Image: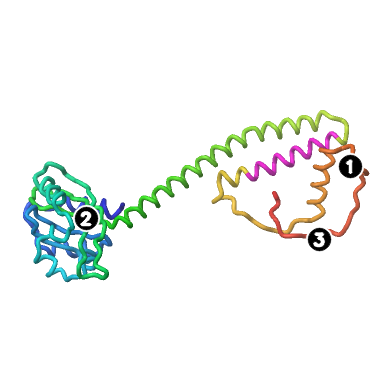
Amino acid sequence: MAERRGIAVAAGTASTTLPAAAHWSEAFDLLATMVAVVQPDGRCLFANAAFENVLGLSRRNVLRRDWFEWFVDPSLLRDTVAAVACNEFSTSRLDAQLKRPFVSPGEPLLVHVIVNQMEQSDVTLVELIEIEQQTRQDREERALDQVRATKELIRNLAHEIKNPLGGIRGAAQLLQMEVESKGLSEYAQVIIHEADRLQALVDRLLAPHRRPHVVGDVNIHEVCERVRALIVAEFPAGSGSNATTTHPSPTSAATASS
């Protein structure tokens, strides 16, 4: 798409005096897409290097022939170039088949043609993009749009999760201060801890570039004790003894929130 805009600017800034072919060659030869400067009568004033490569001919040979003869059915293209040159349209688009008799296997190339008007001139600037290339560009643009939409959905979902988490954590803190039972206080602490863990996860979703996924040493017994506390909170009747045994503290690589 950036190439297309650049060509449009070049077309819009053409001078009233018809420039020589060398005026276009230096810039247009750098483009990956095919570009030609064409008059309505079929005279080709310039063809860039990409156009030469696709046809398998030198620029001199390309310019010698009627430009429309390089197309399978040039009638619509001829009418379009004439209409744009006569200022009926500033830009027009159509699909065409470009002949390639000197390139193996010689099958026509499907191209998307963009005809641009050159200011105060009877010539047109024609850009030809391979249909496959155009399809690939469209597919990439759709993929980028889908990625942006997914990111926006994740951000919205993270905000919807983050707001209730603050309320849950605050309520658990108030409950922990009010209750006198040690067991109930531990349950409140479990709620606070899990709310903090989910909060850290939501923060990573909201700002992944500011919160790198850091892996470090984690005490295995702390993890097991956390799991035990969750099980006791969910199944208090089958928890058995609440006594804990102290062991040496082996470590394992993990994130603190996981």
Tag 3 residue: 250
Front residue of this view, candidates 70 and 35: 70
For disc 1, the neighbor class at 10 Å (few under 14, some 14 to 19, many from 20) is few
Q: Look at the magenta stretch and give its main secondary structure.
A: helix
Tag 1 residue: 239
Looking at marks 1 and 3 on the same chain, the residue that comes earlier in the sequence is marked by 1
- Residue shown at the point (82%, 43%) measured from the top left: 229
The furthest residue to the top = 178
Mark 3 or 2: the one toward you: 2
Tag 2 residue: 127
Looking at marks 1 and 2 on the same chain, the residue that comes earlier in the sequence is marked by 2
In percent of width and height, residue 39 lies at 9, 55
In percent of width and height, residue 58 lies at 16, 71
In percent of width and height, residue 110 lies at 26, 57
Proximity of marks 1 and 2: CB atoms separated by less than 8 Å: no
| Residue 65 located within the stretch drawn in magenta | no
Q: Which residues are magenta?
A: 184-201
